[in-house]
Image (cartoon, rainbow, N blue to C red):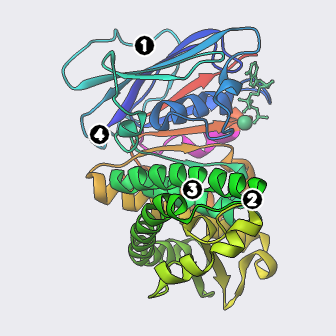
């Protein structure tokens, strides 16, 4: 699967623009603030129906416009490892676009103040969530270390994102859990404000919430078992493999009598006016040689850790889907040392990565790194 073409209308800094991509390596170059990250974000948006940067969809609409639209043609063929070696500039030479049965047209549009629409081959999905995982994508960006430095919410968000692309049932359960949680919390708030509790009504929300929490917990536990060995392998390759890294899933929901514990916690929930136990409190502890990574990991170790997380995500998606995801590499040459850059380039050349998008504010550097690798590279120069 790869993205052949994208058309943008009023997406962030773009007004109307189209790009035809290589099925291998695409290099997006241009000055700071020219819109390189925005283009990667549009691809991410197309695949996952949201921005990689903000939860507020409306921020993707150009300041001067009332709506935005992203349209993309995905080719569902598996990409053969094409070794063309001739580098093209992304202007003028584009081939005529031809529609065939193996293409899928995805359209996402958003009008200010309205809900976004996601269409596949011009038909709306019954639920937008059905789209997630069909066009898998993995992104490496300068903000990745937030997952180490920030609170548990950032880590849950990351792993939920990883699991949502792998497992549609997980995503459905997660969405249901969040709905039930919101309803139960507003009920707790009402009871507390009115100084009155209807236990039966509260049960109507609590029982299914606990049921879904247990399912999500089991899925997270299972996921970590499969993810951890891949993660450790990639960490070892990126670093000198001297440190022992761990990722420990922490959750109260795993307790054998969680249902009773949750019930007994009701007074505390009423006092707090929200649900104080559940998978929305889970965390994933990151450790290096037995110590907290955030506190004791060097910058280089933290960097290797997040890249290993992404590479493990990439490998798990490849295995599960039977084809490699699209890889978005935002500004990595700026942030990585030669050893790690070489590691990623090797994976580009040996066909582990298939379609790749790279941004760089310094085109000469990218050309130097990517030329003569025997991989098809197409350059796109973005102007303000
Ligand atoms: N909704 C929007 N409407 C108009 N412009 C926007 C919108 N959102 C972001 N921008 C603009 O997009 C520009 C940033 O683009 P982007 O982050 O893609 O730059 P970049 O090429 O990646 O730069 P850098 O090299 O610094 O990473 C900013 O000038 C910002 O004001
Ligand atoms: Mg950028």
Camera-side mark, 2 or 4: 2
**Are the residues tagged 2 and 3 within 8 Å (C-beta)?**
no
Residue 171 against residue 202 in the figure, above or below: above
Q: Is residue 373 magenta?
A: yes
Q: What SS does tag 3 mark?
A: helix
Instruction: Tell me the magenta residue range.
Output: 365-375
Label whose residue precedes the other's in the sequence (2 or 4) = 4
Instruction: Say if disc 3 is inside 8 Å of ligand 1.
Output: no
- Residue 22 seen anywhere in this rendered image of the structure: yes
Identify the residue under disc 1.
Answer: 94
Judge from the rendering whether residue 133 lies leftward or rightward of residue 379; answer left or right. left
Q: Position of residue 80 (x, y in %)?
A: 26, 41
Q: Position of residue 310 (x, y in %)?
A: 53, 59
Identify the residue under disc 2.
Answer: 192
Residue 237 against residue 93 in the figure, above or below: below
Q: CA distance from mark 2 to mark 3?
A: 16 Å
Q: What SS does tag 2 mark?
A: helix
> In which quadrant of the rendered view does residue 331 lie?
top right
Label whose residue precedes the other's in the sequence (1 or 3) = 1
Q: Is residue 46 magenta?
A: no
Label whose residue precedes the other's in the sequence (1 or 4) = 4
Identify the residue under disc 4.
Answer: 79
**Are the residues tagged 1 and 4 within 8 Å (C-beta)?**
no
């Amino acid at each position: 699967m790869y993205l052949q073409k994208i058309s943008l209308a009023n997406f962030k800094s773009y007004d109307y623009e189209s790009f035809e991509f290589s099925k291998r390596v695409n290099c997006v170059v241009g000055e700071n603030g020219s819109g390189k990250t925005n283009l990667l974000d549009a691809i991410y948006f197309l695949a996952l129906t949201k921005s990689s940067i903000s939860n507020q969809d409306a921020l993707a609409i150009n300041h001067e416009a009332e709506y935005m639209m992203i349209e993309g043609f995905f080719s569902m063929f598996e990409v053969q490892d094409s070794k063309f070696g001739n580098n093209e500039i992304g202007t003028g030479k584009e081939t005529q676009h031809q529609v065939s049965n193996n293409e899928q047209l995805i359209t996402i549009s958003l009008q200010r103040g309205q809900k976004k629409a996601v269409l596949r081959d011009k038909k709306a999905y019954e639920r937008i969530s059905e789209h997630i995982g069909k066009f898998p994508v993995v992104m490496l960006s300068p903000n990745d270390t937030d997952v180490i430095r920030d609170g548990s919410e950032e880590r849950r968000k990351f792993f939920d994102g990883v699991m949502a692309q792998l497992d549609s049932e997980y995503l459905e359960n997660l969405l249901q859990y969040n709905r039930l949680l919101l309803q139960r919390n507003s009920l707790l708030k009402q009871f507390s404000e009115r100084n009155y509790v209807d236990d039966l009504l509260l049960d109507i929300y609590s029982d299914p919430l606990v049921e879904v929490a247990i399912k999500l917990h089991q899925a997270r536990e299972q996921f970590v078992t499969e993810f951890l060995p891949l993660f450790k392998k990639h960490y070892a390759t990126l670093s000198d493999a001297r440190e022992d890294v761990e990722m420990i899933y922490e959750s109260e929901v795993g307790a054998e009598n969680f249902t009773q514990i949750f019930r007994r916690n009701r007074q505390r929930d009423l006092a707090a006016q929200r649900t104080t136990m559940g998978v929305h409190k889970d965390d994933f502890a990151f450790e290096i040689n037995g110590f907290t990574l955030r506190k004791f990991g060097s910058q280089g170790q933290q960097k290797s850790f997040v890249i290993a997380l992404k590479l493990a995500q990439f490998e798990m998606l490849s295995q599960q889907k039977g084809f490699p995801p699209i890889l978005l590499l935002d500004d990595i040459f700026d942030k990585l040392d030669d050893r790690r850059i070489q590691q990623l380039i090797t994976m580009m050349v040996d066909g582990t990565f298939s379609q790749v998008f790279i941004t760089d504010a310094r085109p000469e550097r990218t050309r130097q790194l990517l030329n003569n690798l025997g991989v098809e590279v197409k350059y796109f120069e973005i102007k303000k």
